[in-house]
Image: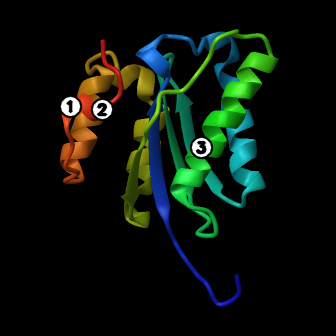
């Protein structure tokens, strides 16, 4: 797109279906690299990613030529297929829905730090609390019954 200039930083969060702990440390790094490849191929800029066993955080510089919903759909579909093709998990699916939160350039260091330190962060806070904290912080109205499946 000529004459289109943007600076859009988006933090994506979504969960494994059923909140199962399926993303293993043994393949976490390779999965993160694969997802970064998806982002680069669509001209997004991956800034930080961390796959927890039951959910994922991704910070990107968004290419405005692709909608966030189409991007998340592509990440979920492609990465789910990749996991199955690698025979890491036979039955793997991401839950429906996602969170997308925007940040200013001045906030990037903090959110990158936050994402890369997920294991430490989750020693004191469960994913449900973390996710609802984001919704509250960003003034997103929500109904508990439509959140991810939390068991």
Q: Tell me the SS state at disc 1.
A: helix
**Does residue 56 appear in the picture of this structure?**
yes
Position of 61 with respect to 96 (left or right) is right
Q: Relative to 33, is 61 above or below?
A: below
Which label was assigned to residue 124? none
In the rendered view of the protein, which quadrant contains the C terminus? Answer: top left
Mark 3 and mark 2 lie on one chain; the one further toward the N terminus is: 3
Looking at the image, which residue is at 23% across and 29% down?
145
Disc 2 crowd, CA 10 A, few/some/many (<14, 14-19, 20+): some
Q: Which residue is mark 1?
A: 144
Position of 46 with respect to 114 (left or right) is right
How far is disc 3 from disc 1 in space, using C-alphas? 22 Å
In the rendered view of the protein, which quadrant contains the N terminus? Answer: bottom right
Looking at the image, which residue is at 34% across and 25% down?
121
In the depicted view, which residue is nearer to us: 110 or 35? 35
* Direction bottom: furthest residue: 3
Q: Relative to 138, is 81 above or below?
A: above
| Residue 57, percent from left and from top | 48, 36
Q: Which residue is mark 2?
A: 147
Position of 37 with respect to 149 (left or right) is right
Q: Tell me the SS state at disc 3.
A: helix
| Residue 58, percent from left and from top | 52, 42
How far is disc 3 from disc 2 in space, using C-alphas? 17 Å
**Does residue 47 appear in the picture of this structure?**
no
Q: Do tag 1 and tag 2 residues touch (Cβ < 8 Å)?
A: yes
Q: Tell me the SS state at disc 2.
A: loop
- Report the colour scheme: rainbow
Q: Which residue is mark 3?
A: 73
Looking at the image, which residue is at 64% across and 21% down?
28
């Amino acid at each position: 797109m000529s004459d289109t200039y943007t600076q859009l930083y988006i933090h994506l969060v979504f969960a494994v279906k059923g909140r199962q702990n399926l993303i293993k440390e043994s393949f976490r790094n390779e999965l993160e690299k694969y997802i970064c490849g998806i982002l680069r191929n669509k001209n997004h800029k991956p800034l930080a990613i961390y796959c927890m066993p039951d959910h994922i955080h991704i910070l990107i510089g968004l290419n405005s030529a692709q909608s966030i919903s189409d991007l998340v759909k592509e990440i979920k579909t492609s990465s789910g297929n990749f996991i199955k093709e690698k025979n890491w998990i036979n039955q793997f699916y991401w839950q429906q829905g996602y969170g997308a939160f925007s940040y200013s350039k001045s906030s990037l260091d903090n959110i990158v730090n936050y994402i890369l330190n997920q294991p430490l962060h989750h020693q004191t806070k469960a994913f449900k609390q973390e996710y609802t904290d984001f919704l509250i912080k960003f003034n997103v109205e929500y109904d508990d019954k439509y959140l991810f499946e939390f068991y």
